[in-house]
Amino acid sequence: MTRQQLIDQIRQKKTYLCVGLDTDITKIPKHLLAGSDPVFEFNSQIIDATLEYCVGYKINTAFYEALGLKGWEAMQKTVNYIPSTHLKIADAKRGDIGNTSSQYAKAFFETLNFDAITIAPYMGSDSVMPFLEYKDKWVILLGLTSNPGAADFELKKILTETDVLDEGMHIVKHQTNHLYEEVLMKASTWGTPENLMFVIGATQPDEFINIRRLTPEHFYLVPGIGAQGGSLKEISEKAMNGDCGILVNSSRTIIYASGKEDYAEKAGAVAMEYQKEMKRYLLRTENSI
């Protein structure tokens, strides 16, 4: 999916919702467990109920990998079930030396046919570039995450050096940045707003203004709305740009809206409420341009 196709879907549907299919077999309605593929049955019903209210689906691969072969089969069937009008994100958080990343890219972009994959940037550019070589595919790089452990490294202040010219003299300017800021600025040189997004957690709302200053054109995948306490209103006001520029992910709040046989209906109702709220914020942005 290209950037323009994604923007067109957002404008057409008046939503920037991404539904997280973090499907835990221990939490799905019990009546599904008698079937041959309860995870896929659950997912397909959720997709049918939420399709018109979202522009993408994020599959957290850990929940499928944990089930072995049956989990991988359910994941493949789920990806195939999602229509091409919707962005298909593998929340796999891969990132390894170049030849290994090349195989991961092949697995998720060719074999499984995802449109995007989340990547951990710790090992640097050569662990990310193999994913960026694919046309019309997306790397979604971990920038500032929503978990408490983000304070361990991402929010640490580091001393950096910048070459500047002062009255014709070459000098070095020292400054401090958060580690995540260095990641955003460096990674922005590896890809473009056409193929590179960043994961920015909704529980870090005060950082969004600065993050948008550093990466004005990039899309952000924003987890942490709903069960994790992030505010859709606050994130929308601080992070949106002229092309919307954000995909807000909600997983548990939507897919586990009910643990009974009406689970799909309830999921659709929650997704519809998100879409209604997002429509208001999108209209404000369009009217301000």
Image (cartoon, rainbow, N blue to C red):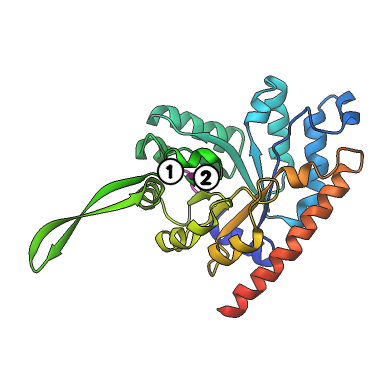
Q: Is residue 210 left or right of residue 268?
A: left
Q: Residues within 10 Å of mark 2 (few under 14, many from 20)?
A: many
Residue 17 part of the magenta-drawn span: no
Residue 14 visible within the image = no
Identify the residue at horizontal 58%, vertical 45% (top origin).
Answer: 115
Q: Which stretch is magenta?
A: 134-142
Number of the label disc, if any, that sits on residue 145: 2
Residue 137 part of the magenta-drawn span: yes
Snapshot quadrant of residue 147: top right
Q: Where in the figure is residue 189, as x and y percent of width and height?
A: 35, 52
Snapshot quadrant of residue 34: top right
Residue 10 visible within the image = yes
> Which mark is first along the chain, 1 or 2?
2
Identify the residue at horizontal 86%, vertical 49% (top origin).
Answer: 266
Check contact, mark 2 vs mark 1: CB within 8 A.
yes
Q: Residues within 10 Å of mark 1 (few under 14, many from 20)?
A: some
Q: Is residue 14 left or right of residue 6?
A: right
Q: Is residue 212 left or right of residue 80?
A: left
The Cα–Cα distance between marks 2 and 1, rounded to whole angstroms, is 8 Å
Q: Give the vertical position of 63 relative to 184 (above or below).
A: above
Number of the label disc, if any, that sits on residue 254: none
Q: Where in the figure is residue 117, as x and y percent of width and height?
A: 54, 41
Q: Give the vertical position of 270 relative to 209 (above or below).
A: above
Image quadrant holding the C terminus, namely bottom right
Query: Type of residue at label 1?
Result: Glu
Q: Does dot 1 land on a helix, a strand or a loop?
A: loop
Q: Give the vertical position of 289 relative to 241 (above or below).
A: below
Residue, disc 1: 154
Q: Is residue 44 left or right of residue 206?
A: right
Q: Where in the figure is residue 35, as x and y percent of width and height?
A: 87, 26
Q: Give the vertical position of 243 relative to 29 (above or below).
A: below
Q: Does dot 2 land on a helix, a strand or a loop?
A: loop
